[in-house]
Amino acid sequence: MNDEPEMKPAPGSTEFSHEVGVKAARKLKAQRHVTQTVWSGLGMMGIVGWSVAVPTLLGAALGIWLDARYPGGHSWTLMWLAIGLGLGCFNAWHWVSKEDKEIHEQEHNGHE
């Protein structure tokens, strides 16, 4: 759905002046949304960071706990740290992919 009202050329105006008016209105609308875009971008970076950090730290904590309970020839901490990091990266990729899809759908719907 397009938020811009469908504008028709005013009587006596040229097609060129109509196109300039439409592009100017689109530019003003984009300038109003810059602040929202910056904050949503910063929020996205925070979400991606936490979606990687939390599983990594939980994996390390589980590994430390297992190392204390079941010492052996291999490191549970290192193994669960790597598993947590892998899950966190997959989680971040999934989140960014979902947001990217939504952005492209909005752009596609806005230009129809």
Image (spheres, rainbow, N blue to C red):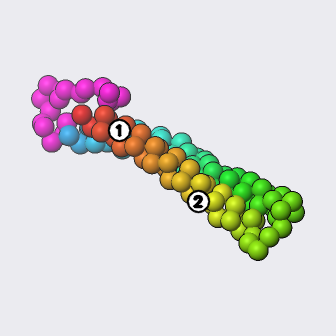
Q: Which mark is residue 105?
A: 1
Where's residue 101, x and y in %? Answer: 40, 43
Q: Is the N terminus in the top left, top right, bottom left or bottom right quadrant?
A: top left
Where's residue 70, x and y in %? Answer: 83, 62
Residue found 36% across the figure and 43% down from its top: 104
Most foreground residue, 93 or 62 = 62
- Whether 53 is among the magenta residues is no
Report, in whole angstroms, how far the alpha carbon at label 1 lies from the one at label 2.
29 Å
Residue at the limit of the structure toward the right, as seen here: 68
Q: Which quadrant would residue 102 be assigned to in this image?
A: top left
Residue found 71% across the figure and 68% down from its top: 78
Over which residues does the magenta segment extend? Answer: 1-18
Which kind of residue does numbered mark 1 sit on?
Answer: Glu
Disc tally is 2
Residue found 83% across the figure and 58% down from its top: 65
Q: Main secondary structure of the magenta part?
A: loop
